[in-house]
Amino acid sequence: MPKNSGNLLEIDTVTKRFGGLTALGGLSLEVREGEIHGIIGPNGSGKTTLINLISGLYSPNSGSILLQGNRIDHLKPNERTAKGIIRTFQIPKVFRNMTVLENMLVPAISDSQQGRRREAEIIPHARELLRFVQLGHMENHLAKSLSGGQSQLLQIARGFMVSPLRLYLMDEPFAGINPRIKGVIMESIQKMNRERGITFLIVSHEMPSIRRLCGRVSVIHVGRCIAEGTLEEVVNVPAVIEAYIGG
Amino acid sequence: MIDSQLIAQYVIAGLVIGVIYALMAIGITFIYSIMKMINWAMGEFYMMGSYLQYFLVVHLLGAQLWFLGIPLAMAVVFVLGMIVQRYLLLPMFVGEMERKDEYATVVTVALMVFFRNLAVVLAGPNQYAPPDYAAPTYIGPLPLSGNRFVALIGTLVILALFYLVVKKTWIGKALRGAAQNRVGIQTAGVNVLRLDQIAFGVGVALAAASGALLAPIFLVWPENGAVATMKGFEIIVIGGLGSIPGSLVAGILLGLVESLGSVLISPSYKDVYGFLMVLGILFVRPTGLFGEKQRLA
């Protein structure tokens, strides 16, 4: 029976091992419907592994992952996208030899019949999103001609093409990005959260961005969640200070 | 002094055989670009195409309807390829095994041995030849074998259709996306394992088309795919693994080098000229003419 806890995503004592290395050791985490939730933690703490597990690139060794009370940990990545989960990567995964506009249309292929029928409808939507992330003037450029920051914008905008979209996972969206593009990314996250009610789970080292965006933050260290709360609350937790500074 | 008309004739012969070689190479590189694995049984799907064409033309359709045999042979091999992918290769791509492509590649090596021996068991070691597709023809003043002319036109038609599907359709866009970024297309919601199945089916159907088109020229026998596979691999090294335009250009180059080498130096070393070109390209441009360096991290 699906539980109705008010949480969009529940991660219950998930363990992920790579041979002898335990990347996540019984991690539990809850993400509430409609929030912008931050994930912080030192390098190698398991943040990207967590995103890979939620998006389906990895399967957990034990534990469960639930979306709206239903287990999703057995589903393939594309099946999770169909449930409304999309993600970005720190190094943007754009289709380099397609135009910017063609990149935007790729999520529509997930149901090709629907895509064919709705082509007239989705192209204006794609253009609107491109204008919103300030890539409208580049729609006919090949994606390989974009800068790193522009590729990140394209990757993020492409995710917004998925419908229905419930949970947006972002892995280091601000890493190596110039301040202007960083501003555009933050604005798009806030707007989509406000207007479409999309829940965000954002992994980042950028504390100013996390402070501006995230109501709640979870701190991960050696594969476990060691603190949770507002950024101001968690940075004063002794275990967090020890994790960052070393003991 | 070498006769200029003779040279022109060899240039045309080289162009023709080059385009036909390219069809096989495009099949190999197409499968590689989507699945990131080399199909070593490609020559055996070529061989099946040639047997099917022979069987259809000689026993079912009759010599007049030879042209119907080619799409039928392609369709049968397409379905067989989808079945092989579904039951023998797909299990290598699920789960979290490392280097999935290598396990799948080993399966194709086993398939190569299996299909070759199956052909010996079913049809014997004999060579068969379907009736000629067309009478000798002329390009301007230059004579050209009717079978080669048909193979050239057939290849160009198939390549044009392939181009249209890849460039203009939704499935083509998905396949291009998978070729450019396999992880990216999965996380954009596309079922990449389904694309693998289609890509494998299409790739082996291109090999079958080569086999069916070339059946009257290179004949029908259990190991007839070996030479075509070798040429296919030479072409993808020259053109760049994963590049479809590269395969076409490299196919034509290989055809020209073999043909002109035969007339200007000696026909005895025809295969050597191609390998020398492969070595030269590897020396100057290891990624091939159209290949891109891959970012590994």
Image: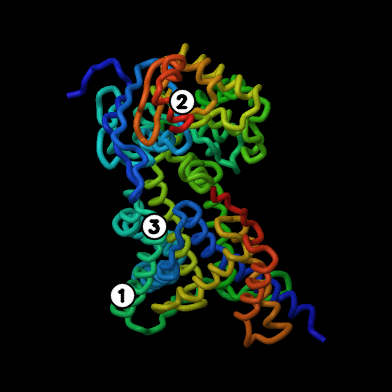
What amino acid type is highlighted by mark number 1? Leu
Q: Residues within 10 Å of mark 2 (few under 14, many from 20)?
A: many
Q: Is residue A116 visible?
A: no
Instruction: Examine the rendered structure and indicate whether residue A62 appears above or below residue B252.
Output: above
Q: Which residue is mark 1?
A: B118
Distance from disc 1 to disc 3, alpha carbons, whole Å, reads 19 Å
Q: Which mark is residue A202?
A: 2
Tell which residue pokes out farthest to the right in this image. B1
Instruction: Examine the rendered structure and indicate whether residue A57 appears above or below residue B267.
Output: above
Q: Are marks 2 and 1 on the same chain?
A: no
Which of these two is toward me, A158 or A61? Answer: A61
The answer to whether residue A161 is left or right of residue B295 is left
Q: Secondary structure at mark 1?
A: helix
Q: Which residue is mark 3?
A: B78
Q: Chain of mark 3?
A: B
Q: Chain of mark 2?
A: A
Lower position in the chain sequence, tag 1 or tag 3: 3
Q: Which mark is residue A243?
A: none
Which colouring convention does the figure follow? rainbow
Q: Is residue B288 visible?
A: yes
What amino acid type is highlighted by mark number 2? Ile
Q: Position of residue B84 (x, y in %)?
A: 33, 59
Q: Secondary structure at mark 3?
A: helix
